Amino acid sequence: MNYTGKPRDVMTLAHELGHGIHDVLASKQNLLNYHPVLPLAETASTFGEMLVFDRLQSTLESAEERLALLCGKIEGIFATVFRQIAMYRFEQEAHRLRREKGEQTTEAYCELWQRMMQEMFGDSLTLGEDHQWWWLYIPHVFQLSFYVYAYSFGELLVLSLYAQYQRDGESFVPRYFDLLSAGCSATPSQLVTDMGIDIASPDFWQGGCDLIREKVEQAKALAATMK
Ligand SMILES: [Zn+2]
């Protein structure tokens, strides 16, 4: 990687190191099932980022630096959780329209894209005219339909696991290592069940959502001290 000493580089290093740890732990599996499936592919990397993020936050001295790091993290989470879900809904709707009403015009896709993305931003900003063409740059709408759920799933899974780690402390670690060591030798839901976590429980996912809310509240409080 290019390392220029910026916080972003530290986070990238933490991310890639996470992938390394995942691969080393899963290397006891065979060639066919050592590599994690897509929904779990970013588990160790995102978890590693969370650990390093919290550590960095505790060492930064100025409120400005802490806020900058925090906002970067929040924007990354929003782009992975909310934006991918908005894209997933766009794909669902685009395919449904095509199925039920036949060939669609370019303008119809532009309008759909604009509407779905605006919904994500609520009234926080108004998307400009040019934004309506952005769906054109995403090849997976046509080539790998609906797979983007994996990004939201993966990020929320890690946030929820991290919330669990904060609650359980030390006892979480061996169970987490077992998850990584399994590679893709079992389904994500089986692997998480083996950790004693019910993937179908809204409470588990709420833990991750609460973590996002907590970060937004922290950012607001930090920004308020700088006025
Ligand atoms: Zn990655």
Image (tube, rainbow, N blue to C red):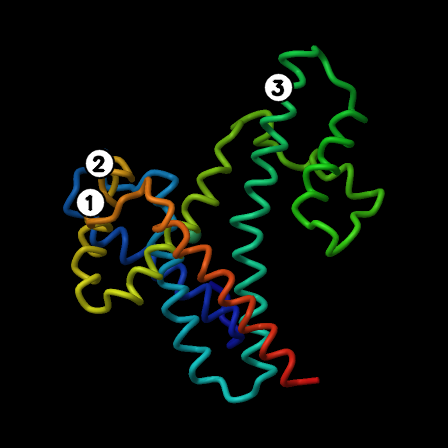
Q: Tag 3: residue type?
A: Arg
Residue 149, horizontal then vertical, whole percent = 48, 37
Task: Name the residue that disc number 1 marks.
Answer: 182
Few, some or many residues within 10 Å of mark 3 (<14, 14–19, 20+): few
* Mark 2 Cβ and ligand 1 under 8 Å apart: no
Q: Tag 2: residue type?
A: Ala
Using the image, determine if residue 33 lies above or below residue 170: above
Few, some or many residues within 10 Å of mark 2 (<14, 14–19, 20+): some
Q: Name the secondary structure under disc 1.
A: loop
- Quadrant of image for the C terminus: bottom right
First along the sequence among labels 3 and 1: 3
The residue at the point 72 percent across, 39 percent down is 134
Q: Nearer the viewer, residue 162 or 214?
A: 214
The residues bearing labels 3 and 1 have C-alpha atoms spaced at a distance of 37 Å
Task: Name the residue that disc number 3 marks.
Answer: 96
Q: Name the secondary structure under disc 2.
A: loop
Using the image, determine if residue 157 lies above or below residue 218: above
Looking at the image, do the residues carrying marks 3 and 1 touch, with CB atoms under 8 Å apart?
A: no
Residue 217, horizontal then vertical, whole percent = 55, 70
Residue 216, horizontal then vertical, whole percent = 56, 66
Q: Nearer the viewer, residue 140 or 86?
A: 86
Residue 162 falls left or right of residue 134: left
First along the sequence among labels 2 and 3: 3
Looking at the image, do the residues carrying marks 2 and 1 touch, with CB atoms under 8 Å apart?
A: yes
The residues bearing labels 2 and 1 have C-alpha atoms spaced at a distance of 7 Å
Q: Name the secondary structure under disc 3.
A: helix
Residue 204 falls left or right of residue 148: left
The residue at the point 18 percent across, 52 percent down is 178
* Mark 3 Cβ and ligand 1 under 8 Å apart: no
Using the image, determine if residue 167 lies above or below residue 154: below
Task: Name the residue that disc number 2 marks.
Answer: 186
